């Protein structure tokens, strides 16, 4: 790659950068022309669509379109508040207006590929400029700052080639993610095929309360003053949710080896086959303890279902994701702004209990799917590494 004919330019030299004419809250409508804020641009950028709930009337839209102009195909809409610097490239049939100050409007000029600039906004080089825009955790990406922000600019033909290369890699990643979703749908289908909908229980399985199948409790309290920067992992509900989504844990917390050993000896610690269940926030999310796991957890945040060996933990985990169990959890959650799933409610939660051998047959099928998912996930990570290296090559 020859960068001799590349230049570094300010975005203000590549785009006419501005925002919109102000639309007052009193002018918002329930129908008409979609009116976007930063949150809608983030959604459009990530998902390609948005279920918009704010509008302005057609007359105001036409007035502003005629007097001030509206975004055209190929223009960039860039978030200026919240999650800064997220881009959406305007499409041919788009018709919307947007909130001033929330969103910056980059009017495309000839000689700049908007898809190339969109990738540039995702690069570490540009992210560092944006995130340092005012030295605050919650900042703003202003028109003035945007105009001064620089990016590497190759010739247009090179921009198009780079976009094609990055599109190929990102397309592979998206297809692999769709594979993961398909595997999840297959697993769900297997559950309902083998056991039926627990709500109707068409196969007449025995129904039991969770207290009949597990010893249910929580942990010995660990005070915040006892948290450490290293040692034995200490999990809260948020970490269990991360595990369920296969997401990395940010800002991990630990307890000392001494405290862990003391509590393990006095009160016990989770072991293979036990289920950890979130009791605050997103309720009822499950994690099955592995043989190699060594951790402690926050009382009140997580419930500890100690296996009695009477059922398959994976079968229970998957049943907890069904409306049959989730409706019980939500219906019995403490009547507070933020609900909680208490030990008392957990003990009363009902589940269907098919024969243990049928549960084992189910788990065997699911584990085969999980092995395939692991291969796909590994492929995603490898392709993501290639994508990141390619981004660094061009924008580093």
Image: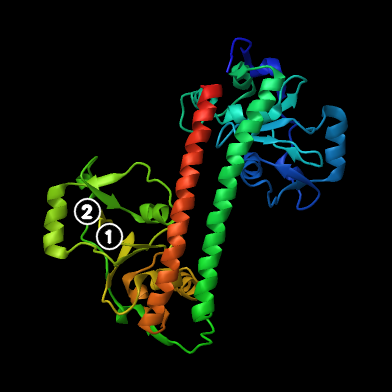
Q: Position of residue 48 (x, y in %)?
A: 67, 46
Residue wearing tag 1:
299
Taking the image as shown, residue 376 lies to the left or right of residue 273, namely right
Taking the image as shown, residue 238 lies to the left or right of residue 59, namely left
Q: Position of residue 196 (x, y in %)?
A: 53, 80
Q: Furthest-top residue in view?
A: 4
Per the rendering, the mark at residue 222 is 2
User: Pointers 2 and 1 in contact (CB under 8 A)?
Assistant: yes
Q: Position of residue 96 (x, y in %)?
A: 77, 41
Which residue is found at the position 41% from the left and 55% from the top? Answer: 241
Which residue is found at the position 46% from the left and 24% from the top? Answer: 135
| Secondary structure type for disc 2 | loop
- Judging depth in this view, the residue of 380 and 99 nearest the camera is 380
- Judging depth in this view, the residue of 383 and 96 nearest the camera is 383
| Secondary structure type for disc 1 | loop
Q: Does 85 sit above or below residue 366?
A: above
Q: Give the mark, 2 or 1, whose residue is nearer the N terminus.
A: 2
Residue neighbourhood size for the residue with mark 2, other residues' Cα within 10 Å, grouped as few (<14), some (14–19), many (≥20): some
Q: Does 378 sit above or below residue 264?
A: above
State which quarter of the image contains the N terminus.
top right
How far apart, in angstroms, are the residues tagged by discs 2 and 1?
8 Å
Taking the image as shown, residue 364 lies to the left or right of residue 203, namely left
Residue 323 shows up from this direction = no
Q: Furthest-bottom residue in view?
A: 204
Q: Quadrant of residue 278?
A: bottom left
Which residue is found at the position 69% from the left and 48% from the top? Answer: 49
Q: Does 95 sit above or below residue 131?
A: below
Residue neighbourhood size for the residue with mark 1, other residues' Cα within 10 Å, grouped as few (<14), some (14–19), many (≥20): some
């Amino acid at each position: 790659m020859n960068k001799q004919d590349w230049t570094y330019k300010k975005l203000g030299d590549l785009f006419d950068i501005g925002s919109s004419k102000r639309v007052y809250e009193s002018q918002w409508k329930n129908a008409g022309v979609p009116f976007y804020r930063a949150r809608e641009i983030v959604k459009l950028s990530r998902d390609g669509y948005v279920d918009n709930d704010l509008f302005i009337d057609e007359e105001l839209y036409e007035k502003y379109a005629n007097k001030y102009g509206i975004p055209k195909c190929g223009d960039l809409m860039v978030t200026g508040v919240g999650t800064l610097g997220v881009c959406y490239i305007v499409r041919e049939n788009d018709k919307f207006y947007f909130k001033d100050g929330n969103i910056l409007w980059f009017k495309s000029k000839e000689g700049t590929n908007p898809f190339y600039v969109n990738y540039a906004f995702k690069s570490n080089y540009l992210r560092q400029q944006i995130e340092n825009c005012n030295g605050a955790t919650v900042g703003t990406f202003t028109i003035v700052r945007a105009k001064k922000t620089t990016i590497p600019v190759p010739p247009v033909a090179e921009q198009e080639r780079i976009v094609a290369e990055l599109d190929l890699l990102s397309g592979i990643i998206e297809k692999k993610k769709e594979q993961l979703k398909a595997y999840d749908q297959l697993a769900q289908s297997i559950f309902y095929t083998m056991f039926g909908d627990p709500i109707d229980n068409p196969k007449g399985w025995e129904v039991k309360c969770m207290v009949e199948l597990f010893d249910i409790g929580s942990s010995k309290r660990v005070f915040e003053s006892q948290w450490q920067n290293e040692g034995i992992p200490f999990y809260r509900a948020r970490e269990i949710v991360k595990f369920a989504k296969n997401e990395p844990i940010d800002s991990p917390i630990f307890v000392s080896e001494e405290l862990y050993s003391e509590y393990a000896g006095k009160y016990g610690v989770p072991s293979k086959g036990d289920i950890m269940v979130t009791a605050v926030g997103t309720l009822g999310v499950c994690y099955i303890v592995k043989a190699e796991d060594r951790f402690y957890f926050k009382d009140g945040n997580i419930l500890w279902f100690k296996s009695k060996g009477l059922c398959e933990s994976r079968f229970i985990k998957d049943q907890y994701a069904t409306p049959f169990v989730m409706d019980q959890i939500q219906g019995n959650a403490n009547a507070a702004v933020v609900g909680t799933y208490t030990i008392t409610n957990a003990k009363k939660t009902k589940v269907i209990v098919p024969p243990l051998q049928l549960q084992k047959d189910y788990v065997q099928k699911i584990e085969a799917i999980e092995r395939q998912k692991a291969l796909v996930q590994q492929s995603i990570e490898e392709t993501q590494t290639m994508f990141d290296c390619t981004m660094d090559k061009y924008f580093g």
